């Protein structure tokens, strides 16, 4: 049984930066005027329909910023082309630009 003192001394193991999966940031703009939630749902549905649930989970989309006129989406680098294809085929929105950092992706806004 672990006593309280030794459990406090245990350190949380962190993943080395070289082992983390690299991400790219996509700026997506809607094709017509929509409400934020409708735009978000349309993009999410387009990704799931095109990629399927399994590849959707592998792509790991994270919505960094959701606004009425754009979405900043983070995706694992291997799946950037698939995500762009899903958006193109669904007519949910269009990808304006892709960047490796959030700061540089702001130039597409």
Image (cartoon, rainbow, N blue to C red):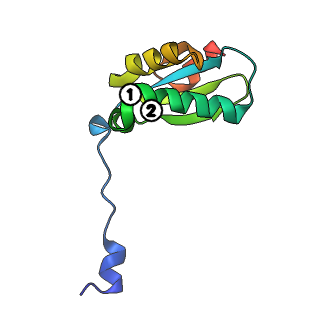
Please tell me the numbered disc located at residue 30. none
Toward the viewer: 85 or 90? 90
The residue lying toward the viewer, choosing from 4 and 41, is 41
Residue 91 left/right relative to 1: right
**Who's the residue at 46% across and 34% down the image?**
61
Q: Position of residue 35 (x, y in %)?
A: 74, 30
Q: Residue at x 41, y 24 (%)?
A: 50
- Above or below 39: residue 6: below
Secondary-structure class at tag 1:
helix
Identify the element where label 2 is drawn: helix
Label 2 neighbourhood size at 10 Å, few (<14), some (14-19), many (20+)?
Answer: some
Q: Distance of mark 1 from mark 2, alpha carbons?
A: 5 Å
Counting from the top left corner in percent of width and height, residue 82 is at 39, 19
Out of 73 and 92, give the one closest to the viewer: 92
The residue labelled by disc 2 is 48
Query: Can you say whether 89 is above or below 41 in the image?
Result: above
Estimate how packed mark 1 is, as few (under 14), some (14 to 19) or many (20 or more) residues with alpha carbons within 10 Å: some
Q: Which residue is mark 1?
A: 51
């Amino acid at each position: 049984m672990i006593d309280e003192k030794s459990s406090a001394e245990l350190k949380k193991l962190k993943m080395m930066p070289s082992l983390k999966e690299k991400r790219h940031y996509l700026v997506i703009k809607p094709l017509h005027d929509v409400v934020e939630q409708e735009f978000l749902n349309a993009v999410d549905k387009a990704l799931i329909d095109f990629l399927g649930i399994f590849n959707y989970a592998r792509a790991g989309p994270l919505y960094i910023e959701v606004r009425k006129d754009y979405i900043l989406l983070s995706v694992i680098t291997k799946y950037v082309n698939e995500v762009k294809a899903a958006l193109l085929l669904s007519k949910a929105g269009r990808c304006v630009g892709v960047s490796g950092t959030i700061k540089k992706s702001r130039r597409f806004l």
